[in-house]
Amino acid sequence: MLLSFIEIAVGDYSFVENRLFRRLFSVVVQTQGYYWDFILNSPPPNWYWVTGGINSDFAVTFYVGDQYRNLASANENTNAFLYAFGQNGVLGYIWAVIIIPCIFLFFDRMYHKENNKVWMFVSFMFAALLLEQGYTTVLLSSGIAFLSVLFFVTKTETGVHSGASGGI
């Protein structure tokens, strides 16, 4: 906090305030508010509560960016459950509520089966990324699926991956 005040006093701009406080707290809440306003007050004509925009080329992240940030190219992401509801309606939300715990269950089973803490790391990364992205984006674009396959394929009987020397 002190560093932020010093930055503002010296240069009239605070990198710490912009990157840390604003982006971690206010932008996240503001974006979630945009999604709720979109869902409750201003959905497009081709969006339905049950199926969302599933029958079209609708992309909720760009719709929210265009409507609320006035930037057609703004990709406004939010947490996985709110994104699933905004993109695919109640069915998308229910699907996310089923799939996401199944993925965590897989990580948990692998941790207990292999007694390898790397599965706790993957699970933590998955959870952290779900706060700002859809679960398909977390799995594919953020690399969680790749990491899971990599760790699943390279497992050893001692729970230490073959690339490690001497154990963890």
Image (cartoon, helix red, strand yellow):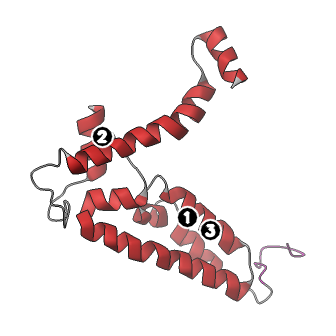
Q: Cβ–Cβ below 8 Å for labels 2 and 3? A: no
Amino acid of disc 2: Gly
Q: Is residue 42 left or right of residue 87?
A: left
x, y percent for residue 63: 24, 45
Amino acid of disc 1: Phe
Per the rendered image, the range of residues in magenta is: 159-168
Disc marking residue 122: 3
Q: Is residue 28 covered in magenta?
A: no
Q: Is residue 162 covered in magenta?
A: yes
Residue displayed at 27% across by 35% down? 68
Tell me the crowding category of disc 2: few under 14, some 14 to 19, or many 20 or more residues within 10 angstroms, Cα based.
many
Q: Mark 2 or mark 1, which is nearer the start of the sequence?
A: 2
x, y percent for residue 4: 65, 22
Amino acid of disc 3: Val
What kind of element bears circle 1? helix
Q: Is residue 156 left or right of residue 70?
A: right
The answer to whether residue 47 is above or below residue 13 is below
Give the spatial CA distance, label 1 vs label 2.
24 Å
Q: Quadrant of residue 127?
A: bottom right
Can residue 5 be seen from the camera position used here?
yes
The residue singled out by tag 1 in the image is 126
